[in-house]
Image (cartoon, rainbow, N blue to C red):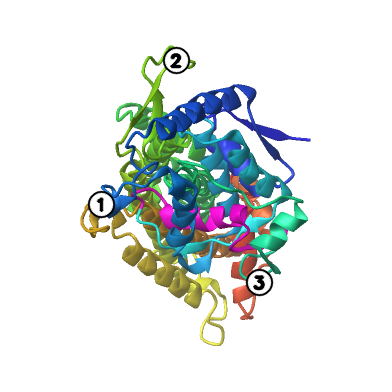
Amino acid sequence: MERLVLNGEQLTVDGLVAAARNPAIKVELAPEAIERMHYSRAAVERFVAEGQVVYGITTGFGHFQNRTIDSDHVRELQRNIIMSHATGTGTPLRRDQVRAMLIVRVNTLAKGFSGIRPLVAQALLDLLNADILPIIPCQGSLGASGDLAPLAHASLILLGLGEAVEAGQSPVYGQRMSGAEVLARLNQKPLVLEAKEGLALTNGTALLSGLAALAIYDAEQLCRTAETIAALSMEALAALPSAFDQRLHAIRPHPRQIDSARSIRHLLQGSSFVYPNGEADPALYGPHKVQDAYSLRCVPQVHGAIRDAACYGRWATEIELNSATDNPLIVPVDPEQLAGEYEAISGGNFHGEPLALAMDFLKVALSELGNISERRTARLVDAGLNGNLLPPFLTEQGGLHSGMMLIQYTAVALASENKVLVHPAAADTIPTSGNQEDHVSMGPTAARQAVEMHDNVVGILACEALCAAQAIDLRWQKHQHLQLGQGTALAQQAIRQVVPFLAEDTVMYPHIERLKQLIVAGNLALAE
């Protein structure tokens, strides 16, 4: 059985996504993490016993930071924060999003700076490993002080409150269970939270980090898919391969631009569909040309920059996945002496700005990935733009049949929608908690928008793939000796396994949906 061991230091985007999307992977706490947690927990108990005034432990929260709580009400304080902060609304998060959030939360606690008992972190893992997941509304987090509302919804189950969904079922349509029913199923009693534990469960960037990891992973795969489909469009439009010459990109050495150009060369290797060097037969390759439109010849420059955005997002996200992000943090006076004295330090590690900006950057990149794809689709369906190399709207019976005319409309609609969603969420902030929390990141909004934009780009690329494959077959019908490249031949084959050549008009939406499924499955992510 596969397993993921959390020690607070080594969680990766790939490891998180694998466990989030495969419930068969069991998640465990590392022994050294449990030891660290015991040290900081002992410090919290000492603070309470000594009557020290420590934010969130012996005081109220946010605007109520100056209200001291006596030791008789410490447990009530921690239970109250869970209940009062569970204020989320909107469509429930997907299963993989909830799982990612829970894994990140436990990995943060495993660092040993949150002052929480290991048994509380283990209670979250018990939910995760049973795949009985809290129902968590997607809206309500400001990304500072962390993801308060979503984490509170997750933590309600530990108290025997809230709602969860049966293993393997949809959070929207599945069978719901009460928190009490979940604990009975797991043969557990409701947790009685001790000092600091309610705050530690709700304070931090677990939702933002989990969403970001999923978004980055999917965006990277989408970049490889987009390059494959772009190469197929290049063949359909008899593009000039000289634009991807290694020498050209070596003298503008952006590394991921170079990677993109190399991928296209690899995909097109052996192709006779692309425009040959020197003179070319107009019947095979259309009018004479010396360069192509930007949406074809500038793919490495555009896609390379998009890869840069995803690369930055991965870098920032993997730092965040292994960070302590709640408040206050219980840290050793001497970092080299974990068994020594500890103190509580209040700060702002819960602020989601690093990932908020990364997700807004990713949104811009995804928008561009869709924009340039739609422009290639436009060239495929417009005979005026492709030099009459292909029949208008990729049908031989134009007029009686509309062909792929409305396919481009759909791509345009999705690209336009992305231009609305791309507005930077981090540029907005509204003060909360009586102006104590007067600047927030809105990172979860940026991450959710990135997920939505990714889905739109999947649709845009499905439209391009449908048109490119149709165009390839139309050229093949007239010139059967033409050969696809070593990578694009595999792509055309994969597309034709789910969508046929369309000689006549038919109901189109099922073809788009099947290609979207092909893209999401990664079956066209053939670029390097």
Q: Amino acid at mark 2?
A: Gly
Point out the tag, 1 or 2, that comes first from the N-terminus: 2
Residue 389 part of the magenta-drawn span: no
- Outermost residue to the bottom: 400
Q: Which residues are magenta?
A: 143-168
Give the foreground label among 1 and 2. 2
- Quadrant (top left, top right, bottom left, bottom right) of the N terminus: top right
Q: Residue at x 55, y 50 (%)?
A: 273
Residue holding disc 1: 437
Give the foreground label among 3 and 2. 2
Residue 505 sits in quarter? bottom right
Label 2: which secondary element: loop
Q: How far is the residue under mark 1 from the one under mark 2?
A: 33 Å
Along the line of sight, the residue nearer the viewer: 515 or 490? 515
Q: Residue at x 31, y 44 (%)?
A: 353
Mark 2 neighbour class, 10 Å CA radius: few under 14, some 14 to 19, many 20 or more: few
Q: Amino acid at mark 1?
A: Glu
Residue 26 point in image, percent of width and height: 71, 39
Looking at the rendered structure, which numbered label has been put on residue 340? 2
Label 3: which secondary element: loop
Looking at the rendered structure, which numbered label has been put on residue 173? 3
Q: Is residue 407 above or below residue 446?
A: below
